[in-house]
Image (cartoon, rainbow, N blue to C red):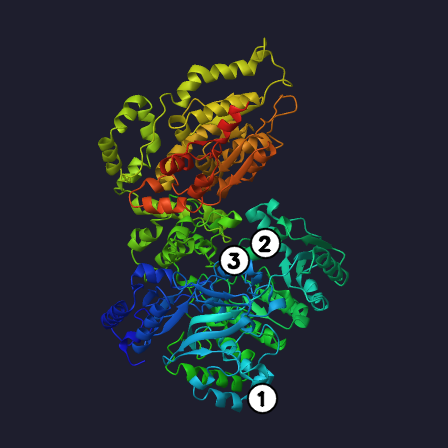
Amino acid sequence: MASPVDVEITGPGAPQSARSAADARAALVAALRASVDGEVSDSSLRRAEYTTDASNYRVVPQVVVIPKDVDDALAAITVTREAGVAITARGAGTSCAGNSIGPGVVIDFSRHVNTIHEIDPEARTARIDPGVIMSSLQKAAAPHGLRFGPDPSTQNRATLGGMIGNNACGPHAVAYGRTSDNVVDLDVVDGLGRRFTAGPDGQGVDRVPGLGELVTANLALLRTELGRFGRQVSGYSLEHLLPENGTHLARALVGTEGTVMSLLGATVRLVPIAGAPTLVVLGYPDMPAAADAVPALLAHSPLAIEGLDARLVDVVRRAKGAGTVPALPPGGGWLMVEVGGSSAAEALANAEAIVRDSGTTATRILPAGPEATAMWQIRADGAGLAGRTPSGAQAWPGWEDSAVPPAQLGAYLRDLDALMAEFGVDGLPYGHFGDGCVHLRIDIPLETSGDILRSFMTQAAALVGKYGGSLSGEHGDGRARSELLPAMYSPEAITMFEQFKALFDPRDLLNPGVLVRPNAIDADLRRPHAKPILAKSGFSFTHDHGDFTQAIHRCVGVGKCRADSTAAGGFMCPSYLATKDEKDSTRGRARVLQEMANGTLVTGGWRSPEVHDALDLCLSCKACSSDCPAGVDMAQLKSEVLHNTYKGRLRPMNHYALGWLPRWTRLISRMPKLVNFALRIKPLSKLVLTLGGMDTRRSMPTFADVPFRTWWKREGAALAATSRAGVGQSAEGQSAATRKPKVVLWTDSFSDALAPSVPEAAVKVLLAAGYDVVIPTDEACCGLTWISTGQLDGAKKKLSTLMDTLGPFAVNGIPIVGLEPSCTAVLRSDLVDLFPDDPRAHAVSAATHTLAELLTDPETAPGPDSGWVMPDLSDVTAVAQPHCHQYSVMGYGTDEALLRGAGATITTLAGCCGLAGNFGMEKGHYDVSVAVAENALLPALRQAEHGDIFLADGFSCRTQADDLAGVKGKALAELLADRL
């Protein structure tokens, strides 16, 4: 480590001046760029994205490298090693222990080095690159009836390289073992630049002089302290080097966390997919009681035994909706036991045998299907949802995945509960109970220091040592637990670990500070150094105690935003799915905002270029507010950033052109025919787009010849009056019993000026359903476009006027129907956060419904005397595009149920249409907007049959389909009105 490039200029006590360190970094970057075809960046933006993972720790790298392929990665490793700079290999960055961050060069294998080279069905193996995503391997192996055994809950974004680095396990390790048990051989390069294949029967041992002698000298130690139970992951798993274990160097290298080698490729073992998987749910009084039942169940060779706390299930109900949780047997804690069989009957018999030995009468058997899938989803979301305690306090990893032998699990959990009570902290335990592994995030107060973290974890380490357990059961030790290894290992074992690392990496270049000569567990903590940013004139952030910094630290880094969840109906994160760039993930943006709050790397506050670069491709779709298990709402955060950046300053032109769109539509509605004629002149249309900061490849919208409010005055009000009075009876003469229920049809600016056929259709549907339709005479703009462009003062003025108009109806219990989903979502969510102390805001929010909600909610649906019959839609085949804001805030399930209940055949798309209001119109966003549309919308429209309907309530969604595919869409109100 003689080269001065090794010095990290932000580190404490750096012996060099900032200038010399910067010069050294520049020399390193130049050398890397000369040898690497992929991206080499030392920009503060890119470094900010990689300062942390899913842990509590923050280490600023000097350089980030994103290689194009394995040879590119090897070139980066070679240049970095020769410069004497630390190397950290990174996959998806979902490590909870801080073992995928480092001070030198971080090499991201996930973006490009992700090829599945071969699947051999006969040998049941796969040859892969380290950046292959776990679920991609499962998908590729499935046609052969095979799968990779271990499957952590992050499998739809975790890479195999990261799983090999940490020795990941997952729920099915009970049946299939850890990652180390499923590795055949590894292609590695060590800290001395030696590239070799490590495998069984001593393969590769001769390439590391002294390794055989180290094993021979420590046979007794290897046999007594290592490999004592399945989830002993902490430290180095050198028991695999024992002759009775096949001298398997590859398995010994699994779980070394990048500290002795960098992985370039692997051959892994595949196993047959279990037939007829059946889930048994068992209820117990509490989690320790559930743990006590595990040893008896292991005798039945289950595929998985997972523990689930009742409080975590309550958090899921609150976050995702009660309907997302299947009916559970009574209990304060549950075991989810999966069994298989050669047939459904055999699987059921195995499940019944589990029930008989469960020691509880609170049982339920779920065959493979939606309910079993929903149960597993609760478990999968635990990594994020457990980031908050039942009281809503932020909970942190650290004591994330401790493990003890299963027979000791119940006693360990009771002692752990007592320890948490002693410290006055809380958390939601869950985990792989069949392996004795417990996942637990704890609300240790990290906002100011790591003192309590150190005290708690020191005592917890002693506790796990008392039960013969492991500090880590699957995530590795990293920065979170390496210092505590002496609590479970003798001094002789610690010395052996040091000697092992020295054989591979004598200069300590590979992931320094982890496992051997570890950094302190309270060093490099991220949260204590983030300054509070209290809410002022924008959003209130009441859910985060009025602190923007707390809101951005909701992101704990689990990385669900990096997963392609559209197959499961998710919408997050459309720009990342289009670019595959960490910058464009919700997590990447949150990391840059966290660095802004820290202020040492991103130093410009609200106006930092890094912040605006990171937020540029955020579509403000709000999908993260629903799909992110930690509840990060990047649309709200982006709006707040723009609000504070431009407050009292000149804004970009598109903020005026698109942010003030309701103003322009109101002016244009006085002369729509003239404006439409002018905008059909292409040079003039392009000029308008250019001056407005919009992309000239976009089409200008066509304004309605007759806005809805004009139609209402001319025709609609008379229709409503006739309907209200009934035949031959005045409204005044109606009795209370026969009087029709009032409903306010709130018409937003888009529907009024650009799509009046939608509110016109809604009027007809509501009248037919027996409602007394009220159209407010005063303007009631929700300020959506002001919110999306961060003009929150203007948005508040609009919403204040809206509350003056709609408030009296809401407080009198009259439902309000919104037609444009994005505007409806403002009333349901943003309104309350902008006016947290105004009772009218809460009343309007509670009173606002979608059309489908109004027609189907028992409290607002047409009464039995209304004569309403849902139109027959059995002749309808439709492609339905839910608006992102509806999906995220109101949910699309009600619309889907209404359509299917009326007989329609629908294909419901997942993912954003790509236009997302002003986003897709703005200059510089067109290509990404189209790429997002290619995720789901455009392929579905191309595959649709002649006569199929494109159904979309969102004006943006209909515009995108028309602009890119020439397909005209219908709103739900129009579809129903057509068939009255």
Q: Nearer the viewer, residue 731 or 2?
A: 2
Q: CA distance from mark 1 to mark 3?
A: 43 Å
Residue 542 position (above or below residue 203): above
> Which of 667 and 447 lies nearest the eye of the viewer?
667
Q: Which residue is mark 1?
A: 220
Disc 1 or disc 3, which is closer to the eye? 3
User: Label 1: few (<14), some or many (≥20) within 10 Å?
Assistant: few
Q: Secondary structure at mark 1?
A: helix
Question: In the image, residue 489 lies at what x, y percent?
Answer: 55, 81
- What is the spatial separation of the Cα atoms under label 3 and label 2, in whole angstroms? 22 Å
Helix, strand or loop at mark 3: helix
> Mark 2: which amino acid?
Ile
Of labels 1 and 2, earlier in sequence is 1
Q: Amino acid at mark 3?
A: Lys
Q: Amino acid at mark 1?
A: Ala
Mark 3–mark 2 contact, CB under 8 Å? no
Name the N-terminal-most of marks 3 and 2: 3
Q: CA distance from mark 1 to mark 2?
A: 43 Å
Mark 2 — residue? Answer: 378
- Quick one: label 3, few (<14), some, or many (20+) residues within 10 Å? few
Which residue was labeled with disc 3? Answer: 139
Q: Which quadrant of the figure has residue 736?
A: top right
Q: Residue 780 location in percent, x, y? A: 42, 29
